[in-house]
Amino acid sequence: MDLVTVKGLSKRYGGIVALSDATFSARAGEVHALLGENGAGKSTFIQILSGAVQHDGGSILVDGQDYRPANPDAAQARGIAAVFQELSLIPDLSVEQNVWFRHEPRTLLRTVDRAEMRRKTLALLEKYNFPALRPDQELRRLTLAERQIVEIAKGLAKDPRILILDEATSALPAREADWLLKLTRQLAAEGRLVIFISHRMAEVRAIADRLTIFRNGATVAAHEANAVSDNEIVTQMIGRHLDRLYPERMATATDRVALNVRGLSSGSRLSGVDFTLREGEVLGVGGLQGHGQRELFQALFGASRASGAIELWDKPVSINNPRQALTGRDGIALVPEDRRGQGLLLTKSVRENLTLSVIRRFTENGLLSRQKEAALVKEMVDFLRIKAGTPEQLAGTLSGGNQQKVIFGKMLLTQARVLLLYDPTRGVDVGTKGEIFQLMRDLAAKGYAILFHSSDMPELVHVADRVMVMRDGRVAATLEGERISEAGILRAAMLEREAA
Amino acid sequence: MNAFLTRNRLIVLAYAGMVVLLLVTALFSPGFLSVSNMRSTVVLAAFVGIVALGQTFVIIGGGIDLSVPWVLNSAAIIMALLCGGQDLPLVWVMPLLLAGGAFIGLINGVGVARFGVPPIIMTLATNVILQGLILVLTGGSPTPSAPALIQFLSVGRIAGFPVIALIWLALTLVATVLLSKAAFGRHLYALGTSATVAEFSGVPTARTTILTYVISGLTAAFAGMLLTGYSGQAYLGMGDAYLFTSIAAVAIGGASILGGSGHYLGTVAGAMVLTILTGLLPALNLSSGALLVVYGAVILLTVSIGSEAFAGLGGRLRRG
């Protein structure tokens, strides 16, 4: 019998229909993948399952009994726990305090039983073979990836019958992502149901028994995983046939150097980076997470203090803040890592976001020209095919892919021809991913120079002209042509440290 | 038009509230809508409105200026002392004190933007320091009366219109241009919405922050001089009421106290609402203590209505 059965589930937020007709069924002991573009309704669906929001219509049965949790506690009482992308951890508490938060083991006097908590934490970490985590580490000292792992531990601590993982691998480096995939199988073998959301097809392929595909707030199909091809899945997700994800690589690089970097250092994470980026080139930046990629991008954009020499189009420049980076055609623009925290004013309109960096371009005698602004906005909305009702729609109400397009538009309007793209496809649906890759190639063909970091290694392999692999804050190797492969990148990222 | 109403719903609400309040007041005290009474209401509201102009900019930018009471009071007392009841010294005293107000704003702004001092601490500190300096300066003795010219600016009339109302109108135009038609306004809203996003978008965040405090120092000092004209002389504590009213006017006017939204046009309605309330309460035979209670309740009410509107917005923002 099915553990969960969902029929005709719907949810509206004001005038926006987030979910219109979701149908779903899953058994105990399986890994069940949810697939769909951003805005397809997956997030709303799992928010309802986990008790974070309540549905308007339709029914959910768990164990054949009606299920309508008023809050996450009520969901947990029925054995359902969720691990979301947005972390719910408290930075001032230790790993174990976070894991058992509000469910701490108690002594007879109702005080927290620290010894018992330590014992249970170690048992949990060992049982599921967690990557190195110390129970007493303060959370604020952990990297994003480590926090994500703590979040998973917190979900498992509730011993759920149904565990929901919302893009849990997107913040994890390759090795930890592998561990998580194995973990899902282990949990299924224990008779639990794992509901798994990922935008990475390979992961879904590796672990899912069955999968359910969402589009536009409704379920479009459910399959046994081994009875359906990648192409069919993608076609059902986007509702049309996608020729291919990665555009054809064309040699558009010229001999002209757009960005020349020598001895760039910043803090303890970036120690002496040298490289050149040419006009028309897409230069990938790879390596294991936390080896200076983030610091490199921030230093180049002036978002953190750095030393070293930077030349843009053969002219030495000093970039102390983003304002100095964004100086028109000879400038350098960044599509940042954190779309919502660094890239977008969520409560402002698409228009205000798009033109924020180029107010000078539509100012006449000190006054803004709304007409000129509208022309710039229209140019970008059309060029990038941003799907917004009107330019006045709030950026925060757009889907993830369209939010990312707005940030691209904002940076393209600055006319800077050196672009820094930090993980631009993270959390973006597959259709928009394809558009972003095509856009990168088109821009390169127009003479833009692009520095491109991705946490998804196949993207580097298929999109970049060259791949610069970072290790310990330096460039460990630069791969070209045939040498660009996932194995090649991993070897360069890891070899020396394993030999040491 | 519809889009205008949705975007500026809270500002429209503030004006609606003002009209309702006017009608209610007229019900209790029939003479309230008379020309002479409306005139004096607008004059009183103008002082609140002028102090709240700077406060509006600071709050939209995500800060708060608690130094307005003693910037205002300092300007008032120093002006009275330097002029000694004469008009002529105003030629240099007014520019000097405006510059002084701007300078205090500069200190506040630099402390907040460059040294990362929380706005509450920074401006509270300058407020207390100014208070101390003025007490030292005057020794608590009364000051000479206000120059006649200043009295004209605050209680005089041109063609039947109070001069100060005309000044207020002019300042409203300037503020509206700055907020709606200048790059500074765009930078300011972005800064108040998210300082990080603004910084990553190339907005000159430090300069913008500093400028808001400078404007606030300017308007507080200016209001202090005008208020001296209104009361005939400067006295210790004359600015105290303006701390609360300047912030309240901004909040009632529909700005988020957390920054990123609002407009001076809303603050104008907020200043009017607060002033009409002070006129309504005597008509109801309420004491000044009761006035404060009602004041506080109105702020709570309006700000919670505002937060409600924002909560609704937050719910519509999608995840992912």
Image (tube, rainbow, N blue to C red):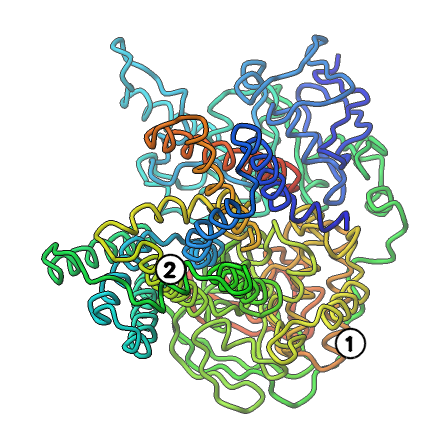
Q: Position of residue B250 (x, y in %)?
A: 48, 48
- Kindly identify which chain the residue marked by label 1 belongs to: A
The relative height of residue B26 versus residue B242 in the rendered view (above or below) is above
The residue depicted at 65 percent of the width and 44 percent of the height is B9
For the residues marked 2 and 1, what is the alpha-carbon distance in whole angstroms?
66 Å
Q: Position of residue A296 (x, y in %)?
A: 48, 69
Residue B6 in view, yes or no: yes
Mark 2 is surrounded, within 10 Å at the Cα level, by few (under 14), some (14 to 19) or many (20 or more) other residues, namely: many
**Residue that mark 2 sits on:** B223
Determine whether, in the image, residue A372 is placed left or right of residue B181.
right
A440 or A398, which lies in front?
A398
The relative height of residue A407 versus residue B18 in the rendered view (above or below) is below
What amino acid is found at the position of numbered circle 2 in the picture?
A: Ala
Q: Position of residue B176 (x, y in %)?
A: 58, 62
Q: Does mark 1 fall on the same chain as mark 2?
A: no
Residue A500 in view, yes or no: no
Mark 1 is surrounded, within 10 Å at the Cα level, by few (under 14), some (14 to 19) or many (20 or more) other residues, namely: some
A499 or A284, which lies in front?
A284
The residue depicted at 63 percent of the width and 74 percent of the height is A367
**Residue that mark 1 sits on:** A250
The relative height of residue B68 versus residue A333 in the rendered view (above or below) is above
